[in-house]
């Protein structure tokens, strides 16, 4: 039997798209094996948002060729789009950018019959097609992702995504609801809505994310909806009110602020200042008490001074963010920031990233400690040494002593202990 392996880099949108590739190949009779094993076909679903991600994408290509020099290697996604000069001499047989991903199965079948380099790269800024890659089940996973939006029109000065993902576009509402129904029918109790700009879902269709959420809440058996990431200016009062009133919408918002310095935010081209950040985050907390708000932050942006970095740390402390994903600034070709003066050394960027990571750890410890003796709802995902592990609505990782019978169920529990960076709970009697 012909076997394939897939490696997925980057965001939750990529995770969804990879599952689409897996499902389409399984339906054609291929067998999936782990990427670390020998396969007949290797698919690398790439990312190009940072130099590190691009480097990992290249590394995966080399690893695949080393494991089986005769294998067909398909490179898909943002790195393929931004490095469309990749050729067969670099061990790549199939190259697909950010459009035409639905063609992957037939391109693989063609490659199995006739070994020749195939390439599908278009100017994504000229495309308005949304490729849904409908999925009925996420294999081996408790929660499922649902890609409802793609593309970006924002053009922040540091970001390559508008050039690799194209213009904003949304999955039609009826298709989104049908995919969600299929996922729930196949056992998924939590669906994570994902997109490049999830909060801008439906603006090209004359609807909104709030309308999508309201329709999804009508699906019988769907116990939790999670929003993967959302920009601050996409959280309007109507959406916030729905989150407040509906406990099935997760009490966790990942809001990428990128900086807490007015000077840096302006250079980044972000659509808010520090005062607006602090005011809006405060309002969200007031409206939905106990909500977890996490964020992405870039450190070492061109011309970022020590004072700018200190201002970012102070801003984050004022907002009491739950935790951070910290990224040293990564220079990307074709972006405005790449042409700016005052690029900082890797030493400075690494040192600031470490300081911000330490702040994040302290904030996360404080937030997790606040849940001691509180009741939470946990979706159990896997077993670890006699404990069942899962996440709460606030995306807190929690362990409960139990058996495999709890796996893939959602149960109420009371958090009783927080030690060694680990939350432990006991099930509440039902």
Image: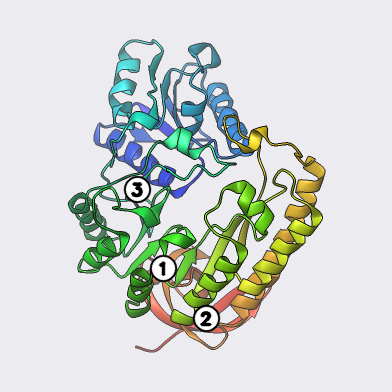
Say if 386 sits above or below 191 in the image: below
Tell me where residue 319 sits by quadrant.
Answer: bottom right
Q: Where is residue 164 shown, x and y percent of the image?
A: 46, 33
- Compare residues 256 and 384 and report the one nearer the observer: 256
Task: Determine crowd level at label 1: few under 14, some 14-19, many 20+ residues with C-alpha closer than 10 A.
Answer: few
Q: Nearer the viewer, residue 230 or 126?
A: 126
Q: Mark 3 falls on what kind of element?
A: strand
The alpha-carbon separation of the residues under discs 3 and 2 comes to 36 Å
Where disc 1 sits, the SS reads: helix
- Which numbered disc flags the more N-terminal residue, 3 or 1? 3
- Residue 146 located left or right of residue 230: left
Q: Secondary structure at mark 2?
A: strand
Determine the residue positioned at 56% across, 78% down.
424
Residue bearing the label numbered 1: 404
Q: Is residue 140 left or right of residue 220?
A: right
Residue 94 vertical placement versus 129 (above, below): above
Question: Mark 3 or 2 closer to N-term?
Answer: 3
Q: Which residue is mark 2?
A: 425
Where on the picture, by quarter, is residue 329?
top right
C-beta proximity under 8 Å, tags 3 and 1: no
Q: How is the image coloured?
A: rainbow
Res 401 visible: no
Residue 149 bears which disc, if any? 3
Residue 209 locus on image (x, y percent): 31, 60
Cα–Cα span, label 2 and label 1: 16 Å
For image coordinates 54% across by 44% down, the residue present is: 156
Query: Considering the image in quadrants, where does the C terminus appear?
Result: bottom left
């Amino acid at each position: 039997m012909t076997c394939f392996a897939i490696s997925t880099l980057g965001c939750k949108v990529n995770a969804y798209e990879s599952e689409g590739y897996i499902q389409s190949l399984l339906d054609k009779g291929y067998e999936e094996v782990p990427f670390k094993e020998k396969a007949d076909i290797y698919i690398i679903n790439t990312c190009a948002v940072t130099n590190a991600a691009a480097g990992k994408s290249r590394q995966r290509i080399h690893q695949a060729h080393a494991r089986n020099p005769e294998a067909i290697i398909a490179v898909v996604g943002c790195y393929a789009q931004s490095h469309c000069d990749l050729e067969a001499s670099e061990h790549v047989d199939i190259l697909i950018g950010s459009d035409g991903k639905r063609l992957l199965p037939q391109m693989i079948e063609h490659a199995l019959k006739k070994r020749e380099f195939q390439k599908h790269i278009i100017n994504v800024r000229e495309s308005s097609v949304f490729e849904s890659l409908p999925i009925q089940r996420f294999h081996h996973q408790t929660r499922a992702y649902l890609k409802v939006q793609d593309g970006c029109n924002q053009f922040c000065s540091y970001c390559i995504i508008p050039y690799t993902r194209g213009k904003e576009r949304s999955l039609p509402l009826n298709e989104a609801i049908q995919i969600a129904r299929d996922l729930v029918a196949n056992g998924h109790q939590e669906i994570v809505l994902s997109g490049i700009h999830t909060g801008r879902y439906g603006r090209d269709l004359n609807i909104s994310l709030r309308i999508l959420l309201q329709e999804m809440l009508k699906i019988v058996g769907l116990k939790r909806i999670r929003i993967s990431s959302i920009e601050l200016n996409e959280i309007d009062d109507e959406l916030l009110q729905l989150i407040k009133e509906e406990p099935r919408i997760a009490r966790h918002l990942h809001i990428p602020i990128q900086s807490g310095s007015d000077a840096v935010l302006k250079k980044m081209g972000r659509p808010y200042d520090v005062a607006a950040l602090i005011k809006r985050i405060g309002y969200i907390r007031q409206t939905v008490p106990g909500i977890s708000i996490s964020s992405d932050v870039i450190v070492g942006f061109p011309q970022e001074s020590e004072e700018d970095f200190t201002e970012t740390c102070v801003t984050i402390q004022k907002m009491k963010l739950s935790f951070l994903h910290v990224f040293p600034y990564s220079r990307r070709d074709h972006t405005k920031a790449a042409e700016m003066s005052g690029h900082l050394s890797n030493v400075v960027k690494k040192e600031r990233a470490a300081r911000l990571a330490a702040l994040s750890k302290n904030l996360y410890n404080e937030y997790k400690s606040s849940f001691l003796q509180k009741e939470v709802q946990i979706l159990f995902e896997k077993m670890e040494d006699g404990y069942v592990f899962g996440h709460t609505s606030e995306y807190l990782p929690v362990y409960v002593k139990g058996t495999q019978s709890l796996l893939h169920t959602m149960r109420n529990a009371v958090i009783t202990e927080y030690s060694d960076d680990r939350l432990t709970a006991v099930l509440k009697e039902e």
